[in-house]
Amino acid sequence: MALLARILAGPILVDVRAGTIASLPAVLADGRIATTGRIAIAVGSGVGADVRSLVASSVDALMIEVDGGSLASARSLAEHLRGRQLEALVGIGGGGSLDVAKWAATAVGLPFVSVATTLTHDGLASPVAVLEEDGWKGSYGVQPPIAVLVDLDLVRSAPVTHARSGIGEAVSNLSAVADWALARDEVGEPYDGLAAAMATVSALAVVNEPRTAPDDGLLGALADALIMSGLAMTAAGTSRPCSGACHEISHAIDRLYPGTGLHGEQVAVGAMFASFLRGDARLGEIDRCFTRNEVPRLPSDLGLDAGAFAAAVVAAPSTRPGRFTILEHLDMGESETRRRVDEFIETFHR
């Protein structure tokens, strides 16, 4: 019998609304997640005391505080979970904390429930954990969440720069998909049209959203877009639909100039520059969206001058060996890169 359709692994529950963290006990009572209530909760160090007390008073679980972002934290959490006969792990926090918890849940074979308190990047629902070790950030394949909760009350109370970072991350899908199509056409890389469509539609939902953060309309659309981006990566079995030259540039900035900006802010500038190099027809739409939402567009918005940004562009391909994007296609040297960076800045400087 012919295979009529693919089976796409996705969360059994997605809940995006104000106050949704209060539904966590009901979610954990779902027999598909846990049957005996042996739950561990990894809480990001930045999660407020009010949220911690709410969760502690409503859920009988092992509570563990985690520092977000490092592979060492993920390994430490995994070791803490081993041998406890748990049924599920809940992660509560921002992108870095959720990545730590996702990695640990995968390492010990536990279903993972993602509770996002900020919308900085698409890690809240993706099959990828970005973790730092010895000053280098690496991407690790993990099992995607079995359930995703986004509490818009908590998201709204976070610094608005977090939402702007998430906008940069979501909209950069347009650049990533264009890079993926380029790799298909130039080097014959496998290309998944369904995953590409999911990533593109999620990006356009944010591009075309007239409201701005911290309006709940924009925050809800952004949460949906980031969750759909995670599903696009799950469908593709790779981060390709959401990661191209834009992410290579961001990883290079992390290596050369640690602490420059939030991940999505750096990706936004990378997406602008990569789209400029391709002469992308959607660059104007991307620019208007970033301008409307005060998302970084140019190196100076990140505190980088033209020379520093050009150095990051030159170093970018080395961050993802084997990945083909507009940077690998053009194969620009240092002088040509600097010329194109200067041209880019001159074109979009206001």
Image: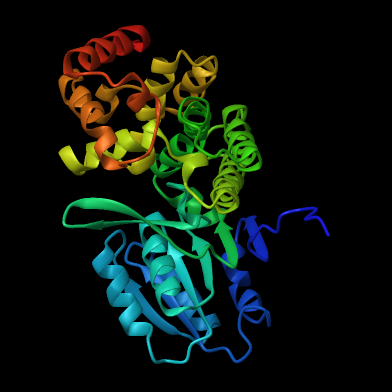
- The percent coordinates of residue 232 (x first, y second) are 58, 47
Question: In the rendered view, does 35 fall on the left or right side of 330?
Answer: right
Query: Does residue 278 appear in the picture of this structure?
Result: yes
Q: Is residue 188 or residue 125 the one in the foreground?
A: 188
Residue lying at 54% horizontally and 14% vertically, measured from the top left: 281
Question: In the rendered view, does 91 fall on the left or right side of 5?
Answer: left
Q: Dividing the picture into quarters, in which one does residue 70 lie?
A: bottom left
Question: In the rendered view, does 30 fall on the left or right side of 111?
Answer: right
Q: Dividing the picture into quarters, in which one does residue 101 lie?
A: bottom left
- The percent coordinates of residue 146 (x first, y second) are 59, 68
Residue lying at 68% horizontally and 83% vertically, measured from the top left: 31
Above or below: residue 59 compared with residue 343: below
Q: How many marks?
A: 0
Q: Is residue 127 or residue 63 the one in the foreground?
A: 127
- The percent coordinates of residue 169 (x first, y second) are 45, 39
Residue lying at 36% horizontally and 38% vertically, measured from the top left: 247
Question: In the rendered view, does 86 fall on the left or right side of 333?
Answer: right
In the rendered image, the residue lying farthest to the front is 1
Above or below: residue 253 compared with residue 284: below
Query: Does residue 257 appear in the picture of this structure?
Result: no
Q: Is residue 338 or residue 261 the one in the foreground?
A: 338
Q: Is residue 214 or residue 328 the one in the foreground?
A: 328
Above or below: residue 257 compared with residue 343: below
Rendering colour mode = rainbow
Image quadrant in which the C terminus is located: top left
- The percent coordinates of residue 205 (x first, y second) are 63, 34
Image quadrant in which the N terminus is located: bottom right
Residue lying at 51% horizontally and 15% vertically, measured from the top left: 284
